[in-house]
Amino acid sequence: SWSVLLHLDEGARTLFTWELAADGTATFSNHDIAGTWRCRKDVVVVKQPCFIFGNDLYYSGRVRSVESHNLVDGDSEWAPLRMTECIVETSQGMELTRVGKFSAH
């Protein structure tokens, strides 16, 4: 699961988690309606439907490994991941409009 800190440009902030399943569905700890997600190379887009005032939110960012993570002798755990260059957009008719940013790890 990913921990997400959402910062809306209007000033609101919230902390929640999302689970991204292999079948392309996304579940959110702050919302009952499941969404979707897609990945192309290192860019991930997560859609959270009907969230703010009934509008869909689209979270997009690049997935990176945490550079400061050092594996302990023989430890084969995956390095932690984080998302960078993260923005949040909503649909306004046929266009996407930026409404904030987020961080995730």
Image (cartoon, rainbow, N blue to C red):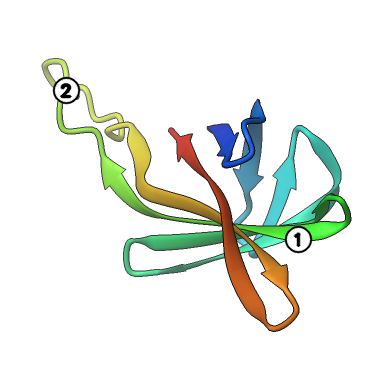
Q: Amino acid at mark 1?
A: Asp
Work out how far the residue at label 2 is from the one at label 1, CA to CA, in angstroms: 39 Å
Whether residue 67 is situated above or below residue 44 in the rendered picture: above
Residue topped by disc 1: 56
Q: Position of residue 68 (x, y in %)?
A: 15, 24
Residue topped by disc 2: 71
Q: Quadrant of residue 7?
A: top right
Which element type, helix, strand or loop, lies under badge 1?
A: strand
Q: Nearer the viewer, residue 45 or 25?
A: 45
Q: Amino acid at mark 2?
A: Leu
Number of residues whose C-alpha sits closer than 10 Å to that of mark 1, classed few (under 14), some (14–19) or many (20 or more): some
Q: Earlier in the sequence, mark 2 or mark 1?
A: 1
Q: Which quarter of the rendered picture does the C terminus lie within?
A: top left
Q: Which mark is residue 80?
A: none
- Residue 9 relative to residue 104: left or right: right
Whether residue 17 is situated above or below residue 38 in the rendered picture: above
Q: Quadrant of residue 31?
A: top right
Q: Nearer the viewer, residue 18 or 54?
A: 54
Q: Position of residue 101 (x, y in %)?
A: 50, 44
Q: Position of residue 15 (x, y in %)?
A: 63, 25
